Amino acid sequence: MVAGDGGIGSVREVVVTSELPVGVSVERLDKLDDDKHVLKFSIIGGDHRLVNYNSTITLHEEEEKYGGKTVVIESYVVDVPTRSSGEDTCCFANTIIACNLRSLAKITEQMVRKAK
């Protein structure tokens, strides 16, 4: 489900397909800057423990260091829920991010193969 026109303020419901105890995440697009390669979003609902999660994703072309590849960096802030530790919350968030980045890499590689 996506509510809105897909621009700033639009909301989407993401079905999480990992082995984590999460089914759905509801996210809002806060900023999208194609020129600066920056995307910001907030998680505003879902059946998980990421409360007040705000993320910034940036893309960096690394021609010298990584042979022309793009490095994706996601930084975030999130509240630590009651009965949880900061370490557990970060571990959970980092696991979700790793799943998302693997999915992004797979989709990007498929797009590159199709374009050739």
Image (cartoon, rainbow, N blue to C red):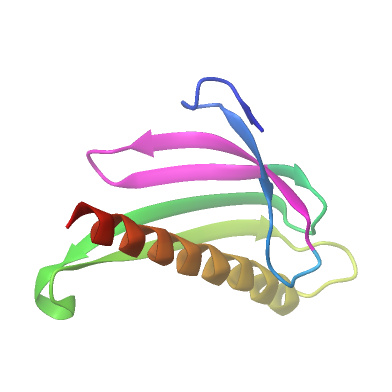
Residue under the point 59% across and 57% down = 77
Q: Nearer the viewer, residue 50 or 85?
A: 50
Say above or below: 95 vs 107: below
Q: Give the side of residue 107 with respect to residue 33, left or right.
A: right
Q: Where residue 27 sits in the image (x, y, percent)?
A: 63, 41
Going 41% across and 59% down the picture, which residue do you hit? 107
Q: Residue at x 72, y 70 (%)?
A: 89
Q: Is residue 82 left or right of residue 43?
A: right
Q: Looking at the magenta stretch, what is its main secondary structure?
A: strand
Question: Above or below — where is 22 with respect to 84?
Answer: above
Location of residue 65 by image quarter: bottom left
Q: Quadrant of the N terminus?
A: top right
What residue appears at the point 66 percent right and 57 percent down from the top-left corner?
Answer: 78
Viewer-proximal residue among 21 and 62: 21
86, above or below 80, in the image:
below
Q: Is residue 99 above or below residue 49?
A: below
Q: Position of residue 7 (x, y in %)?
A: 46, 26
**Is 78 covered by the magenta stretch?**
no
Q: Which residue is most to the left?
A: 64
In the image, residue 22 lies at what x, y percent?
78, 61
Image quadrant where residue 17 sits: bottom right
Q: Which residues are magenta?
A: 22-43
Residue 41: percent from the left, percent from the top? 53, 43
Q: Quadrant of the C terminus?
A: bottom left
Asked if residue 19 lies left or right of residue 102, the reply is: right
